[in-house]
Image (cartoon, rainbow, N blue to C red):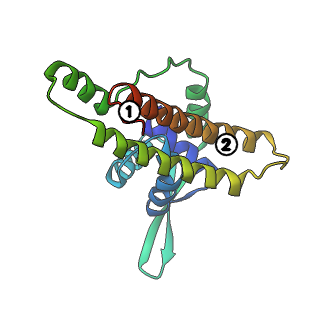
Amino acid sequence: MSLPHAILTSLLEKPCTGAELARRFDKSLGYFWQATHQQIYRELGRLEEDGLIVARGRATARGSQRHFDVRPRGRAELERWSLVAADPRPVRDALLVRLRAAAVLGTVGLDAEILRHRQLHRDTLERYRTIEARDFPAGATLDRANELQRAVLRAGIAFEESWLAWCAETLSTAFHTGA
């Protein structure tokens, strides 16, 4: 995935200002693709320069803000990109490299760090389940767009559940904590 495509997706969902986009990004796509506000603004400039989005001034109490809309060319690019085959990304996590280092060093105990990660994954899983209960209540009939949105959320839930299972297994086997 790339940041420009995440931005195009978000703007197609709802055209907005850069500040609104950054806030919305933090609350939705940001769970699956991280970017700083500075990166988002820089990418908005590139997308506008490439003719994929258009900015128009919008009067506010603080002056004029730039409001972004996706142009037909931007929609076509997102459609093209959506159809391109992509291989799964390999796991890239510093904790796993640190565990390898601990195995080589033999002197580093990372059980406290794994416990901390377990809590972080629990918190994220709880947040995702809260979103699922709020946005996709059990028994609700969903249209295709909402089913796809729910599928993204379910992938996040499965990801967090797998990390929690891994933490439990690693703590009980490698650190014998039984935690």
Residues 59 and 13: in front is 13
Type of amino acid at the residue the image marks with label 2:
Gln
Quarter of the image with the C terminus is: top left
**Residue, disc 2:** 149
Q: Secondary structure at mark 1?
A: helix
Mark 2, other Cα within 10 Å: few <14 / some 14–19 / many ≥20: few
Point 79% across, 49% down: residue:
138
Helix, strand or loop under label 2: helix
Three-letter amino acid code at disc 1?
A: Leu
Residue 18 visible in the current orientation? yes
Q: Quickly name the residue at label 1.
A: 171
Residue 139: numbered disc: none
User: Would you identify the image quadrant in which residue 46 lies?
Assistant: top left
Say if 148 sits above or below 17 in the image.
above
Mark 1: few/some/many CA within 10 Å (<14, 14-19, 20+)? many
Q: Is residue 127 left or right of residue 97?
A: right
Circle nearer the N terminus (2, 1):
2
Q: Can you give x and y, in whole percent of width and height, for residue 157 in the image?
A: 58, 40
Residue 88 vertical placement versus 98 (above, below): above
- State the residue lying farthest toward the bottom: 61
